[in-house]
Amino acid sequence: MKKYVSLLLFIILPFCVYGQESLSSDELFANARNAAFEKKDYTTAINLAKQALEKSPNYTDISVFLGRLYTWTDKVDAARQVFEELEQKNTQDEDFFVAYASLEYWNNNYEKAINIIDKGLNYHPKSEALLLLKAKIYNSNNNFVEAEKTTSAILEINPKNTEARALSIRIKELTSKNAVGITYNYSHFDKQFADDWHIVGLSYKRVTPIGSVILRGNYANKFGEDGTQLELEAYPRISKTFYLYVGAGYSGDVGIFPKYRTGVSLFANLPKSFEGEIGYRQLHFTNNIWMYTASVGKYYKNFWFNLRTYITPDSKNISHSYTATTRYYTKGANDYLAFLIGTGISPEESINNLLGNETYKLKTFKVGGEYYFSVKKTNLFSVSATYYNQEYSPNQKGNQIDITLGYTKTF
């Protein structure tokens, strides 16, 4: 039996070798891509790419692909040799510069990667791939000002570039060391309360090496009475993927504001331009109210979609609040139109002191819009309006309109 198997292999093997050798460089290239992308067999892909280059030594696309294969399999020296040979040939293909700079970026050679990209941009000044890679490198190197400039350049070329938009939003808080802001909120009720509400907030933000810190003071006139509140918030960065929100507040005017409030959330910048959050908020009036929150967001071209929930358990039931928000970015990270719709009251809203009366267990519908815009990048303006239809006691509903104006100066 072994004799027949050996004879069969002896007859078939030359034909297999001949069949492989008879393939054109394009066919070998296609087979190499199939082995890499469909089968994840990088060893076979490398061998096929080498065979293709033996037939067509000046086939740039195959050489770039071979360099990428070496990069993906951590054969850094082999990858660099391929790219250096292409550089000596004065290769000007966009994909070559992207692949070569990616190799150096993934191996933390940021300066060399930027030099490669800049050379590529001389030939392809509007290359979104090169500019996006450049922005990522600056972001990884904590050069947020240059990263912001680069993402802005991409969005001028293509406002619908999802990755550039997401990165632009993530770094917007890191490009200015300081910001001072003022907000004014006005609330009108048709039935629930006789007096309109007024809230004025002053804030100062400082960007530190570990993240942003915000100090805020609020003054409010509600129920015909005055009250003040002091808040401190921070957004410490854990890694390029994760960061925290940590907040606390105190007021001696209970009822106008909660006496204490705390909150913690863990945020994650996820693949495919998704982002997520999970955390809690705690309000103390005469008793503690614990609210657990989660949200998921997605950037898509000019848009940002977000769905957030607050869940408030007690001894009898669990109350829910849901808000869906859509933003349409008109220019940069601080220029957008937004629309929101939802149910329930959240602790971030101006009417959060109503939570002390357990109206969070009653039915509330809300719909609103926001407009944020910047002037010369350092002057940020906002205006928003929200309509509430709220069940303020069982089977008793009233309407409320909130209008908020804001201005922030960054420097």
Image: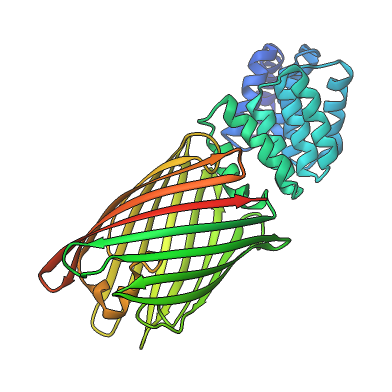
State whether residue 377 is above or below residue 155: below
- Residue 40's place in the image compared with 174, above or below, is above
Which quarter of the rendering shows the N terminus? top right
Task: Say which quarter of the image contains residue 181.
Answer: bottom right
Q: Nearer the viewer, residue 393 or 293?
A: 393
**Residue 61 point in image, percent of width and height:** 71, 19
Q: Is residue 378 among the parts visible in the rendering?
A: yes
Above or below, 394 against 130 in this view is below
Q: Nearer the viewer, residue 19 or 204?
A: 204
The image position of residue 37, as x and y in percent, is 59, 33
Name the residue: 42% across, 52% down. 405
Q: Nearer the viewer, residue 262 or 228?
A: 228
Task: Tell which of 400 and 284 is nearer to you.
Answer: 400
180 with respect to 68 (left or right)? left
Furthest-right residue in this view:
88
The x and y percentages for residue 230 are 52, 75
Q: Residue furthest left?
A: 395
Q: How is the image coloured?
A: rainbow
Does residue 87 appear left or right of residue 298 in this picture? right
Number of labelled discs?
0
Give the residue at x 31% y 80%: 356
Q: Residue at x 10, y 70 (%)?
A: 395
Name which quarter of the figure residue 134 lies in: top right
